[in-house]
Image (cartoon, rainbow, N blue to C red):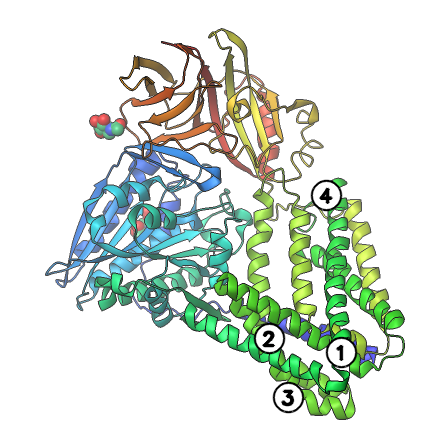
Amino acid sequence: MGEAWGAPLVLLYLLALRALVQVSHRQLLSPPARGEEREGYLDNITAIGPRTVGSPENEVHTVNYLLEQIKAIESESTDAHKIFVDIQRPTGSFSIDFLGGFTSYYANITNVVVKLEPRGGAEHAVLSNCHFDSVPNTPGASDDAVSCSVMLEILYTLSKSSEPLQHAVIFLFNGAEENILQASHGFITQHEWAKSIRAFINLEAAGVGGKELVFQTGPENPWLVQAYVFAAKHPFASVVAQEIFQSGIIPADTDFRIYRDFGNVPGIDLAFIENGYIYHTKYDTSDRILTDSIQRAGDNILAVLKYLATSDMLAKSFEYRHGNVVFFDVLGLFVLAYPARIGTIMNYVIAAIAFLYLGKKVLQPKNRAINNLKKFFAAFGLMLLSWISTLVTVLIVAVFISLIGRSLSWYTHFYVSVFLYGSAAVVKLILVHTLAKKFYYKNTNDQYLGDVFFDASLMVWSVVLAMITRIGLCSAFICTLWVAFPLLTKLMTHEEFRQKGATMKFVVMYMLGMFVPYLYMMYLSWTVFEMFTPIMGRSGSEIPPDVVLAGFIVASTMILSSYFINFIYLVKSTKTTLITLTTVFVVTLILVCSGIFFPYSSDAANPKPKRVFLQHANRRFHDLDGNLVKSDSGIWINGFDYNGISHITPLVPEINDTIRTPCEERAPFCGLPWILPVHFMFRKNWYLPASEIFPASPIHFKVLTKELTPWNSLRLSFEVSGPSHMSLYIRPHEGSALSTWSLGDGTPVASVGGDYFVFYSRGLQASPWHFWIELTKFDYCDHTKLVVSILKPVSFDAQHEHESVIAHLYQIVSDMKVQFVYDAIIILTINLCY
Ligand SMILES: *[C@@H]1O[C@H](CO)[C@@H](O)[C@H](O)[C@H]1NC(C)=O
Ligand SMILES: *[C@@H]1O[C@H](CO)[C@@H](O)[C@H](O)[C@H]1NC(C)=O
């Protein structure tokens, strides 16, 4: 086999597969299926503006808009159904272990609930959930107005139909999801219709536009996956996504968790995942969502809802509760789904066949068995060695890039990462095997080596297959593909290879045999990179994104190269390939080091903003005796990614490392007003002195009572009033402990670091917040620290003293894309003597 045609052929093969994957992701759709399109919901909801909980936009304007539309739909509905509408304003509290654990309290937030019921009534229901609130400073088109528009459209279609459904469909337009899942909790734990719900579909966004991915189903309840498989017209679903998401490495959560944990209802979680770069930014606008994309989501969800609402299984879901399902779509054309039990058996059978094949080959003829075995394990060892050394080499490059401050060079130009880390990985792999061929296998026949290394790869993947199946992961099906097809290919090409060696014909047959698993692996890698690359722009100041991405690239390289390693031994020379790839790597490295690839982009059509978190804060610190020891005001600045503010300083010199603020160790959560307990992800903070801020609803914080309980603990009760968003931190004094409180289920849940974090929010109207806590093992002058921070969305108008700096800052940062702007206050109240 000659290098001159072998290497380009492999490259061409991979590029062709890549192109096919691209085509499959772009083929959004067939033309609209329904004639009566009612457009404008999405534009009209986003036109209301950012919809934060507690703002009139969210609590009044959007709610009124939804009610009007529902009324209009009702007026056109047929007699087959009845439509009921309810506005719920729940108050409640719960603790979850998301982000290390915290507690949430909500008062009078808003849900708009619609029930579509067959005329004769229905005992069971299926729930469809979207949220109409948004984070500050974004029109929240994709997250999640588009889903609410799709739901209105579906309500319209179903209500116009004269065929009655068998069960009710409940549409929940929930008004507080960005407040970490409060509204869904209020609905599922308090609303009277919640008891009839047997399954749900949740419509979410982790990106903007594109296709919506089914990334979670269950727990268990395989019939739900079946419903999607049967009904969805343009499926996009993967159990791999489910297992990645449920492992917790993506810093996000959805209402799915609330329905599962507090409602005990199984469901399907769908999300738009494309273009996560602008998720939660002001660029999440309706014009960026293709009509195709909406149509596609609508077709899918309507079909699945209809299927569920006419299914006998919904009523008796408990009978079909058990078992997991392996499911994945094939290039968006159809979904394969089968019970995990069958998958397990299939996996073991295929692994066993592979082991048999390998065993037979290595152990025969008997007189050479020991020798064969030795050679086989040497090849196996070399494989592992080449992988480990590749990983180490590429990670060293990634760490170097992070240390010199060139992180995220590939954030806008993704192919930079492929040229940098991908070429380094391939060079290292080829180098190790070329050296092995040259020095270790001096006089061994190429054809024999090619064979042994193929077997070594097969062995690796058979072992991995058996192990992953043993652990119980459904994702093991990938390894099944990765063992079964190569084995078949091997058997198919065996004769040609034995007689003539690595001819062109052999190579072409080999590549054809590998077509399915390689195409699938490419498809999967594309989805993973599509999801994870944007997340690197908001993964905090602590994890170097280059190391993570380089790790992903090495893993993909290892997997995709595994059945081409044998070619290194078959090919006469690797020199040209090595020189070419090394040149690519070195040139890219030099360019990256020179800083030519600016990570972010303000390209209007396709922005990749840098995320910056700004809060205008006043802080007051008291000592344990209640004396004010320090107070200040400033703009608290948080870069959302590893680069911190390094790209801001050249533009706004005021923001530089001299204003880096240390963690205030004696105060909970570093003495900064977090909206969520994410202090462990953002350890680098900057604080630019600024004028004092006067929030529209100032905070009033009162200790109402202090009493000794008969069970000898100290109960303290409080009253707080203030703006729509507040956070409360609690740190009991050393020696005393927080034993119970009026929040959550009564058991206090500590956050990372041991302090307690309570997130408060309210709708437009709420009475003062009353709560109590109980301390045990206190002394009579307990020094429990209570920190209250108020957070309220604010816009930076010309109301500030340091106007020029702030206006300048705001302008620059808004070009770089501010994520949130809040104003905030922290008050530390201490010394609660009995
Ligand atoms: C959206 O708003 C426009 C302008 O006010 C109006 O003409 C249109 O009917 C609205 N569409 C819907 C579906 O609300
Ligand atoms: C909810 O709002 C009503 C008035 O609309 C008020 O009476 C009630 O106290 C509020 N509930 C809470 C928990 O704030």
**Sequence order check, earlier mark of 4 and 3:** 4
| Mark whose residue sits in front, 1 or 2 | 1
Q: Crowding at label 3, few (<14), some or many (≥20) Cα neighbours within 10 Å?
A: some
Residue that mark 2 sits on:
483
Q: Is residue 485 visible?
A: no
Question: Of the residues under marks 2 and 4, which one precedes in the sequence?
Answer: 4
Q: Earlier in the sequence, mark 3 or mark 2?
A: 2
Mark-to-mark CA distance, 3 and 2: 14 Å
User: Which residue is located at x 41 percent, y 52 percent?
Assistant: 204
Q: Could you say which quadrant of the image residue 176 lies in?
A: top left
Query: At label 4, which amino acid type do we have?
Result: Ser
State the residue in front, 262 or 531: 262
Q: 550 left or right of 528?
A: right
- Name the kind of residue labelled 2 in the image: Val
The spot of residue 465 in percent (x, y) is 57, 68
The circle drawn on residue 402 is 4
The three-letter amino acid code for the residue at tag 1 is Ile
Name the mark on residue 492.
3
